Amino acid sequence: MSNILEVKNLTTHYFTAEGPAEAAGDVSFSVRKGEMLGLIGESGCGKSTVASSILRLIEYPGNIVSGEVVLDGKDLVSAKEKELEKIRWKDISVIPQSAMNSLNPVYTIGDQIIESILLHEDVTKKVALERTKSLLELVGIDKDRWKSYPHEFSGGMKQRVAIAMALSCNPKLIISDESTTGLDVLTQAQVMALMKDLQKRLDLSIIMISHDLPLVTSVCDRIAIMYAGKIVEWASTDDIVNDSRHPYSQGLLNATPDLLNPDKEVSSIPGTVPNLVNLPSGCRFKERCQYAMNRCSEESPALLEVKKDHHVACFLEEGDYRE
Ligand code: SF4
Ligand code: MG
């Protein structure tokens, strides 16, 4: 399967009075065509920074310091702003954080989808309306509801509208940034099932950003786990669940209750996430890691492929350190 997106050694800083905060440090991963990739980590670990960097929407005082973001063969970090204007939304669309609150209350949902089509494509209003109706049906909403206003819809239906909107210009890649936050668990599961179904039927490529590990493992093909601005592990969902190698990934899994196994002992990871402005030398996880050794204070572990399609950034994977 070919890659639709390749993020290579991406580093993004926010410049603060106390010095630069490295919200994304040497981040590398890729998304295959037709794949749903989960990007997961605690709040503030850099997931949204990676998303904004992909779209080159990092705002002052932030800046992409180095790296490449290659979409279908084209580097977006070095692209001109005019080119990016065409790429955003048409080639990469976003289902925003708390998507259900992102609709404009004074326009019908149909008008909002039509508007987003007309803004990016040279088609007539009639064509845009027809496409809007099919998009609504695609996400499980009666096509005649295009005349409804957002307040006439439930949270889950507004979420479906946001998905229809993201699909409106046939993008190459969709980024969903914590988009189901705020929905109840049942509605969240239904929306996820819809996204999975659409991914398969339309061969969509999706980056699913979330702090919710069970949610991501239920729908994603591969998962990249971030900690303090770094990707610490990136593997198939099966490997993340059954063969995770990084101590932080293992900690996250241990901290997650298992509905199928109520006897499972749940334990949280001791300690707190380091300050991105004042990062410790060496491995950023060392202060919380039960396996930390001298080397972990001196060097930063690189993300290495430890077996096919399974990448880990931890010295334990470089030799037989672990008992
Ligand atoms: Fe722990 Fe060292 Fe591995 Fe970091 S590199 S996760 S501190 S063992
Ligand atoms: Mg975020």
Image (cartoon, rainbow, N blue to C red):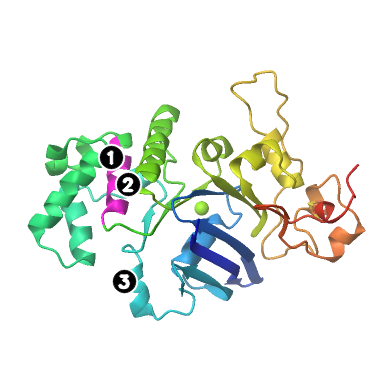
Q: Position of residue 235 (x, y in %)?
A: 63, 49
Q: Position of residue 321 (x, y in %)?
A: 90, 50
Residue 86: which numbered mark, if any? 3
The residue identified by callout 1 is 139
Q: Residue furthest front?
A: 1
Asked which quadrant contains residue 168, the reply is bottom left
Three-letter amino acid code of the residue under disc 2: Ile
Q: Are marks 2 and 1 in contact (CB under 8 Å)?
A: yes
Residue 209 falls within the magenta-colored stretch: no
Q: Secondary structure at mark 2?
A: helix
Mark toward the start of the polypeptide (3 vs 2): 3
Going 36% across and 37% down the picture, which residue do you hit?
Answer: 194
Q: Secondary structure at mark 3?
A: helix
Going 21% across and 59% down the picture, which residue do you hit?
Answer: 117
Mark toward the start of the polypeptide (3 vs 1): 3
The residue identified by callout 2 is 163
Q: Which residues are magenta?
A: 157-168
CA neighbours of label 1 inside 10 A, class few (<14), some (14 to 19), many (20+): many
